[in-house]
Image (cartoon, rainbow, N blue to C red):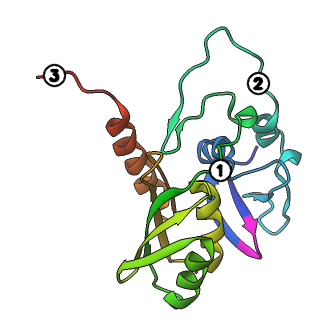
């Protein structure tokens, strides 16, 4: 069994990722059954994710449970029913987009942001955007303009959601922990 996987998207390779990280990506819709992946045992042979037994289980419909566990991500409570969740209604959302461009020009990213809706630059590498896109769709659109070491963080201020790219496993975990803590109601002192 593979202990890590590499994901190939748009002729770029990302990873290696652990099974736990792949589970999170699948639950967020960032990894699909048809996504090209390679195990650490066959790093140059990319095949659809569903061809690996350990990953195929991520795409099988979950059996209904009397009470499903709550699984929070920055996108909210996705739970076991993420794959059958109804799409969000097309409404204008307000996004704050921040980028750390280390390997590419900011111009391509800025043009892509302008194509996504009404946008203004707040400061270097930070924008305010009004768009009908979801936070995940926006992230997936914008990462096409990023290099291997560039970072992106998006806050959906309208729906209290966030999405990010290229922060590494440790920071990814820290971001999720802070976001989850902010979601919990706090008792009055």
Write the residue at 58% across / 70% down.
Answer: 117
User: Viewed as shown, does residue 9 lie left or right of 158?
Assistant: right
Question: What secondary structure is marked by label 1?
Answer: loop
Quadrant for the C terminus, please: top left
Q: Quadrant of the N terminus?
A: top right
**Position in image of residue 131 (x %, y %):** 57, 63
Tell me: residue 63, above or below residue 71.
above
What residue range appears in magenta? 8-12
- Frontmost of labels 3 and 2 is 3
Residue assigned mark 2: 62
* Image quadrant where residue 155 sits: bottom left
Q: Residue furthest top?
A: 66
> Where does label 3 land, which residue?
188
Within-10-Å neighbours for mark 2: few <14, some 14–19, many 20+: few
The reply to whether residue 146 is in sight is: no
Q: Main secondary structure of the magenta part?
A: strand
**Mark 3: few/some/many CA within 10 Å (<14, 14-19, 20+):** few
- Residue at the image position 37 percent from the left and 35 percent from the top: 183
Depth check: 148 or 3 in front?
148
How far, Cα to Cα, is label 1 from label 2?
Answer: 28 Å
Specify the label residue 68 is tagged with.
none
> Disc 1 marks which residue?
90
Residue 187 visible in rendering? yes
**Relative vertical location of residue 64 with respect to residue 166 in this rendering, above or below:** above
Going from the N terminus, do you reach mark 1 or mark 3 first? 1
Left or right: where 80 falls relative to 161 = right
Residue 36, x across and y down, in percent? 81, 60
Cα distance between the residues tagged 1 and 3: 36 Å
- Apparent side of residue 114 relative to residue 56 in the rendered image (left or right): left
């Amino acid at each position: 069994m593979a202990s890590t996987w590499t994901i190939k998207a748009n002729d770029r390779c990302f990873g290696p990722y652990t099974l736990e990280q792949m589970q999170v990506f699948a639950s967020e819709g960032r990894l699909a059954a048809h996504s090209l992946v390679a195990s650490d045992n066959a790093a140059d042979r990319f095949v659809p994710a569903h061809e690996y037994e350990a990953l195929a289980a991520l795409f099988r419909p979950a059996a209904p449970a009397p009470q499903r566990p709550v699984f929070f991500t920055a996108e909210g409570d996705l739970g076991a029913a993420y794959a059958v969740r109804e799409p969000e209604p097309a409404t204008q959302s307000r996004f704050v987009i921040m980028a750390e461009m280390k390997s590419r020009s900011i111009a391509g990213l800025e043009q892509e942001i302008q194509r996504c809706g009404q946008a203004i630059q707040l400061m270097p590498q930070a924008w305010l955007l009004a768009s009908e896109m979801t936070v995940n769709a926006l992230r997936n659109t914008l990462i096409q303009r990023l290099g291997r070491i560039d970072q992106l963080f998006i806050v959906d201020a309208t729906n209290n959601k966030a999405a990010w790219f290229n922060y590494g496993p440790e920071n990814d975990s820290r971001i999720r922990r802070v976001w989850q803590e902010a979601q919990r109601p706090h008792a009055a002192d």
